[in-house]
Image (cartoon, rainbow, N blue to C red):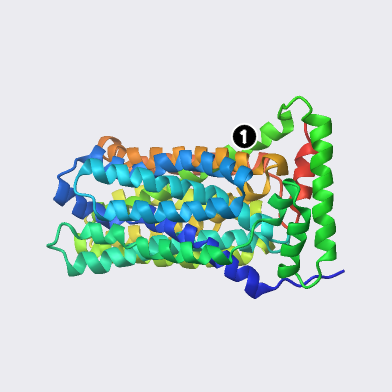
Amino acid sequence: MSKTISKTNLMTVALIVTIGGLLFGYNTGVVNGALTFIEKDLGIDALQKGMISSAVTLSAAFGAVFGGSISDRIGRKKTLRMIAWIFLVGALGCGVSTSFTMLVSARFFLGLAVGSASAVIPLYLGEISSASKRGKMVGLNQVMIVGGQFLAFLLNAILGNMFMENVEIWKVMMGLAIVPALIMIIGMTKVFESPKWLVKNGKLQQAIEIIKSIYQEDQEQADEIEKLKQLEDDAKEKTQAKGKIPGWALKVLIIGCLLGVIQQFAGINSIMYYGAEVLHTYGFGESASLIFNVLNGVMSVVASIVGMSIVDKMGRKKLENTGLLICATSLILVGVLSGILTGQSYAPYVIMILIFIYIFAFQGAVGPVTWILISEIFPAKYRGSFSGIAVFVLWIANFCVGLFFPVLVESIGINTTFYAFAACAIIGVIIVSTMIPETKGKTLEEIEGFFNSNAS
């Protein structure tokens, strides 16, 4: 029996939920440009700059773990509503901060929402999507993340150039996140609970009613949900009798954690957090760096839309490996050509083009595929908790990049730092090629069955 998704209903829900992704992007990207004013206003050093940037990412690591686990207990919808309120309070705290300590504390609190959103939103989107549309639906969150970063870069460039002499303009930059947080809070009244979560918690009838609101033909989907419930019951009887997690499931968890490390150690957030300063290092003026940094955001949005459009056709593995290889090549060329072209007037523009190529490859391939795979590969019984752990590891890696990038640049130079990121991307190609199955077009239950049946 064929079924037709009510696209308006699903897309409305997806757009509301992924405002959390936009806030994720905005609050992580807003320091890129705001730091220049914070440094002048608060008199901070390189380490303190790293702490302001990475306070969100450190907290996000814990938010991911707790968010994933909490969503398994109380449901995806209630967790997302809680996340929206944390976004609101955290943005308000940043906007009224008057000291380094107050700002770091506010951004640390804000990070709880960022981390929880990064774990729960892809999970939720993956659970409400059909196998053929799952890549595109989860990819929408990546578009919103980079859209949030672009919005931050754009507003920073406008405000920074309009109020260049006002060192406190960073408070407005950070405080503007209040607006989408309020929209998300209001919009959550239209969001339904994940049918798969309801089934796992013995609420099959509620799940069927939700399915009826999404699909014109609900019987096939209702049958699949019942089968999933039976599979979970069987798994509990056969392998979870003593409460132990099976070895094959732990192996999948490790794979998910490696995906998170690969994504971050490829170095994207050295550009997304410090892009204006990177461009300044390679020869652009302060004002021009802010403006050109907006182009980074534009490139990210375009790339994410392209990635979302092709991921269900091209496949996860091929897209991920292609992106990693282009990222590595671009970073190596930045280092090599910046040395060869020293003193040339056009050198900064060559470097900027290479950085744009790097951003396009990452945001169109590596970034979205990582989030899609994390939403797909974990077994149903542990999906929320395992997603939280994998995203925790991802955020710890993100934290390391955000905290130590300014220090590494000062100690070993920006080119050597980029070479290290390139090496990590190449290692990532090896890991993806040998450990990750192709999940394109497969149901979540089929993916779980693959790992279970191939357990050594």
Residue occupying image coordinates x 84% and y 50%: 227
Quadrant of the image occupied by residue 156: bottom left
Q: Is residue 278 above or below residue 429?
A: below
For label 1, the residue is 254
Q: Residue at x 76, y 72 (%)?
A: 4
Q: Percent from the top left, x then y, of residue 17? A: 54, 61
Residue 414, image quadrant:
top left
Mark 1 secondary-structure assignment: helix
Quadrant in which the N terminus is drawn: bottom right
Task: Look at 76% across and 54% down and name the residue there.
Answer: 443
Q: Amino acid at mark 1?
A: Ile
Q: Which residue extends farthest top?
A: 242
- Check disc 1: other Cα within 10 Å, few if <14, some if 14-19, many if 20+: some
- Image position, residue 315 (x, y; %): 67, 57
Q: Is residue 424 above or below residue 326?
A: above
Q: Is residue 405 left or right of residue 72?
A: left
Q: Is residue 392 left or right of residue 103?
A: right
Residue 196 pos. (x, y %): 72, 52
